[in-house]
Image (cartoon, rainbow, N blue to C red):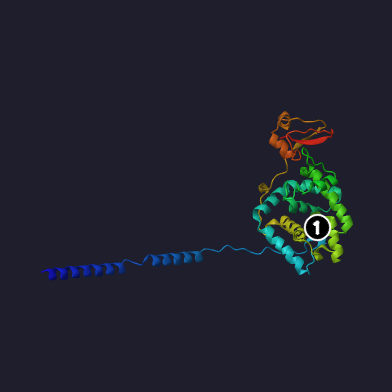
Amino acid sequence: MQATLKLFYGLLGAFFVIVLIVLSAYSGPNQSTKDTTVQQSLQQDSLKKPVQKVQAPPFPQNVHFAGEYLPVDNFDACERLDREILANTFRHSATFLYLKRAKRYFPIIEKILKKEGVPDDIKYLSVAESGLSNAVSPAGARGFWQFMSSSARERGLEVSSEVDQRYHLEKATVAACKYLKEAHKSLGSWSLAAAAYNMGKAGLQKRIREQGAKSYFDLNLNAETSRYLLRIMALKEIMQAPQKYGYYLEDQDYYPAQPAYKIVEESGSISDLSAYAQKHKISYRMLKVYNPWLRKTSLTNKYKKTYRIKIPTI
């Protein structure tokens, strides 16, 4: 009897094992197979979607800076310019800001350049230097034209704890013109004058003597200066024809001219610029926006200079 029971339970267990095997075989693919199927499906879907199209920006013809043309027979110069066009074409947010700000600040700069007898293309130096903003470099250069304090003072700008005219757009633009005119007179071309603005006139003159070169494009310079003029030329090309490089702005997208203001001349001290702003029915913030060269909360004016302060009228 016991032998019969053992045989019965053995056959029953074998039956259940067979049933489990059969059910497993017909329950569909295992997890690994499922994962592979899902992955294949996703790949097929991705092939149906359009791939983002990135085109090389057009290389400009007859590109020049202040009337000095890029030597198109110089492959090195052309490739250096191409690099800068690529870098600035695909640097979207920064280039958009340059275009927006130019509408506000270029008219101010252009007027001064014309008065000072400096080529209009020089305005693109301020884009390359600061992006048309009162930037501060790691080395301590400041303002639209990125003057170091010593260079600023040499060209008539006041730089102190209370007043820093490197932040005064009009005065700093005049100072930049002075430097560039001096460099142009010494070096003989605006391209070399621009290079000198970046690396210093003495350093550039030394490289010219060492290498016997007469053109910026033939000089072997440090990495920053060897890119500098080409970057300015690239910015000029993009900003003069933004749609050609994929930038589409409507009139309302540009920053408008700075709202109207009046000039108030002050020859004494101002103990509290916040109270001064309230006196003129403007905010302290707007006083600083219009006069970023005022660096403290007061103006001691120890030497009784006459300062022209902009007060917004709307």
Q: Position of residue 2 (x, y in %)?
A: 12, 68
User: Which amino acid type is shown beneath numbered disc 1?
Assistant: Ala
Give whichever of 149, 37 is nearer the camera. Answer: 149
Residue reaching furthest to the front: 2
Q: Is residue 174 above or below residue 223?
A: above
Q: Is residue 112 visible?
A: no
Helix, strand or loop at mark 1: helix
Q: Residue at x 85, y 64 (%)?
A: 210
Residue reaching furthest to the right: 185
Q: Residue at x 87, y 63 (%)?
A: 209
Q: Residue at x 16, y 69 (%)?
A: 6
Position of 49 compared to 153: left or right?
A: left
Q: Quadrant of the N terminus?
A: bottom left
Q: Position of residue 144 (x, y in %)?
A: 75, 48
Position of 202 compared to 34: left or right?
A: right
Q: Is residue 114 visible?
A: yes
Q: Position of residue 200 (x, y in %)?
A: 82, 55
Q: Quadrant of the C terminus?
A: top right
Mark 1 crowdedness (10 Å alpha carbons): few <14, some 14-19, many ≥20: many
The residue indicated by pointer 1 is: 195
